[in-house]
Image (cartoon, rainbow, N blue to C red):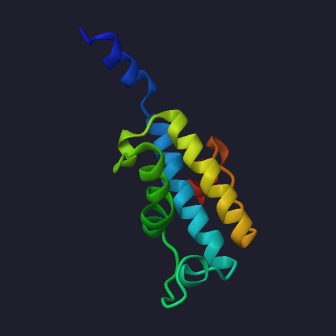
Amino acid sequence: MLCEHCQSEIKDKRTSQQNRALHLYFTLLAEALNAGGFDMRETIRQDVEIPWSSDTIKEYLWRPIQKALFKKQSTARLKKKEVDKIYEILNKTIGERTAVHVAWPSEQTRNLCDQSQ
């Protein structure tokens, strides 16, 4: 039997559904930034022209916020509320810099993306 603290950690841990949404969000944001003409040079650094991908979204946008707020290296260690907080900050920041806003993926969004593949 797990102690109360361990049970609470498991209960608050990010769900598999939230994990799928997280990675779909990375892909959708990369596509939206690329479509808007905002490559990594335009968004982060002026000396490198690199299109966005889900991996670069995760490493250069998501993970720095995650580390700063929660001192966690892995997205697998995030709790539900932590994912929500990182998304809010990232969406606000990207929106202010680029006017690109990507809604957090819903079940309907995931189904549409699955059908298009």
Residue 117 in view, yes or no: no
Residue 23 in view, yes or no: yes
Q: Quadrant of residue 34?
A: bottom right
Residue 12 horizontal/vertical position (percent) = 45, 26
Residue 58 horizontal/vertical position (percent) = 45, 61
In the foreground, 86 or 115: 86
Does 20 appear above or below 61? above
Residue 116 horizontal/vertical position (percent) = 59, 62
Residue 71 horizontal/vertical position (percent) = 38, 46
Residue at image position (64%, 44%) is: 106
Residue at image position (42%, 40%) is: 78
- Residue at the limit of the structure toward the right, as seen here: 99
Does 67 appear above or below 93? above
Residue at image position (36%, 43%) is: 76
Residue at image position (69%, 56%) is: 92
Does 43 appear above or below 76? below
Quadrant occupied by the N terminus = top left
- Residue at the limit of the structure toward the left, as seen here: 1
- Count the marks: 0
**Is 56 placed left or right of 37 in the picture?**
left
In the foreground, 51 or 64: 64
